[in-house]
Structures are given as C-alpha cells and as structure tokens.
Amino acid sequence: MSLWAAILVAAAIAYALKLVGYLVPGHLLEGARTKRLTAALPIALLAALIATQTFVTDGAVVLDARAAAVAVAAVALLLRAPFILVVVLGAATAAGLRLLGWAS
Amino acid sequence: MTEALDPGVRRAVIRAALSVGVATGAYGVSFGALAVAAGLDVWQTCAMSLLMFTGGSQFAFIGIIGTGLAAAPAAIAASSLLGVRNGFYALELTQLLAVRGWRRPAAAHVTIDESTAVAVTQQDIRASRLGFWVTGVTIFLLWNLTTLIGALIGNALGDPRSWGLDGAASAAFVGLLWPRLRSGDAVAMAVVAGVVAVVLSPALPPGLPVLLAALAVLLRWRR
C-alpha cells in the first residue's frame, strides 16, 4: 500500500464515521455501555501511542530523551500550560538533552 | 426562529467559538512539522488536514506510519478507532443542528471535539448552531493554514531528532490525553494501555501493540 493510498483510505473512513452519525437512527447506538466504551477508546489509544512513541525504537524498549520530554510535558500540563507550549517544551527538552550529550 | 438571537449572546458565542478556533489552529503547526518528520511530504501532510480533519486521528496516523509503510493497516485502524467518537458527536448534533441538503455533508466534515463542545454548551438552540458553524469553519481554515506552515518549517529543519521533534510528538499526545484523565478509572486505563503496548512491542510489528492495548482496556472495562 502506498502512503497516498493509506492517507486517502484513512481520510475516507474518518469522514464516513462523521457522516454516519447524521444518517443512522440515534436509538440504535444509544446506551450507557456504548457511551462508556466510546469514552474509553481514545484514552486507551492515546496512552498506548504515548508509551510506544516514547519508549520503543525499532521494536526495542529504550529510555532516552523522549521520556524526559514526556515528563516535562506532564509538569507543564499540571501547571495549565497551553497545548502549543507543551509541544515546544517537549521538543526543547529532547533537543537540549541531546545537545548537552546527556541523553540519546 | 421568529426572534433574532440576542446580540450580546451572539457576540459571546462568536467570541467563544473564535478563541477555541485560534487555540486549536495553533496545534496545526505541530501536526505539520511532525507529519513531515514522520516521512510525509508537504502535499500529503496538507491532504491529511484537508480530508481527514480530526486532530487525534491525524496524530495517531503519522505516529504509526512513521515506523514504516508496513504499519499502514495499523495506522489506518488506529486513526479510524479514534475517529469513532466523531460519529457519536454527530449523533448528538443531528437533532440540535437539524441540517438538511448540502449542509449535512459539510456539517459532518467539521464535526470534531471542539465544534461539538461549543455547540452543546449553549443554552439556546440558535446559539448552538451559530457556535457549531463558527467554531468548525474557523478551525478548518486555521488548521489547514497552520498545517502548511508547520510542514514547511518541518521541511526546512532537517534531522527531526536533533530538533527534538520526537519529544514534541510524545508531548503532543500527552496534551491530547490530558483533558480525558478526569477520573481514577481513566488514569488506570491509560496506565494499563501504556504498559501493554510497551510489553508487546518487542514481539509484534509496529502499530499492532497499540491496537491490542486498546482492546485489552475495552475488555477489562467492558462492564
């Protein structure tokens, strides 16, 4: 599968998911359990993505500058920093530690 | 619909919608730069923001596809699973907005976290509709503009690691997850998902551990 094909397929599915909510009768999908699982899904996916993006390189578990970036991001969020600042601090932490030679 | 919306309410809704829009638009720079760092070209990066237009899914897609094209099915699956919530937003919005004709596919495209949040928090149905459209359209314009800017910056930067862009990607995901960690259960789910994903990573192709971690959480918290 080419990168373009993957992008177009993912975009088509994303749009179809939005549109289907306007087209299907609502009572088919309502219910406390469905609601709870819908809320759980993003939490699980985002947490799993953070973990793999931070601690995995080419299938190996590693601890490097990315872990420090995540720690700094969490502290910034605790202090109610805006999203863009959190991202910039994450980049600065990883770049700074590598520049100083303190982490790979 | 006979009475016009109170001008004070109208101004407040537009102000709320625009401030949410501007704040979200700023994420676009990070998305653009990180997408290029993950191996997309500028056109592909812009196509994602134009056509997919749902931030969490876009970040997830580039996070997984960055490990190589072999992970494409997992990247599509992860971005789609994250997109499921937009369908539920649409379900809530369909009566509130009462959209018909060409407006329906347009409303669907801008049905995201922020436009839904602004719409459902208004007291008046006309304020809800105004809030939905102003937020949705503002974010759409700014998200695409800032994605392009970010992609051009990312292109100019060169080696993404020396600029800490991998750290920025992780930080961006923490920022997306943070507002959802409002209960002890949510934190427990996040920890379980993270641990499962890392433990499975050495044994499985990239992307798959993320999907299995999500499945583990759904099975554990299904009741």
Image: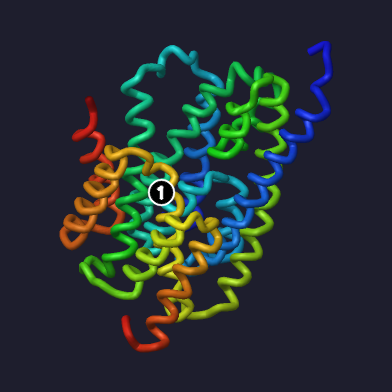
Color encoding of the figure: rainbow
User: Residue A1 or B205: which is nearer the viewer?
Assistant: B205
User: Residue B184 or B39: which is nearer the viewer?
Assistant: B184
Image quadrant in which the C terminus of chain A is located: bottom left
All told, the count of numbered labels is 1
The residue that disc 1 covers is B177
User: Residue B115 or A3: which is nearer the viewer?
Assistant: B115
Q: Residue B95's quadrant in the figure?
A: top right
Q: Residue A30's quadrant in the figure?
A: top left
x and y, in percent, of residue B10 in the image:
78, 30
Q: Residue at x 59, y 28 (%)?
A: B121
x and y, in percent, of residue A54 in the image:
32, 64
Q: Residue at x 27, y 69 (%)?
A: A58
Q: Is residue B214 left or right of residue B13?
A: left
Image quadrant in which the N terminus of chain A is located: bottom left
Compared to B52, does A34 lie above or below?
above
| Outermost residue, front side | A79
| Chain identity of mark 1 | B
x and y, in percent, of residue A16 in the image:
51, 33
In the structure shown, which secondary structural element does the residue marked by tag 1 occupy?
Answer: helix
Compared to A54, does A80 lie above or below?
above
Q: Is residue B123 left or right of residue A24?
A: right
Compared to B191, does A100 lie above or below?
below
Q: Residue at x 61, y 72 (%)?
A: B153
Q: Residue B32's quadrant in the figure?
A: bottom right
x and y, in percent, of residue B167 in the image:
41, 69
Neighbourhood count class around disc 1 (C-alpha, 10 Å): few under 14, some 14–19, many 20 upward: many
Please, what is the three-letter code of the amino acid marked with disc 1?
Leu
Q: Is residue A89 left or right of residue A70?
A: right
Q: Residue at x 40, y 58 (%)?
A: B63
User: Residue B105 or B145: which is nearer the viewer?
Assistant: B145
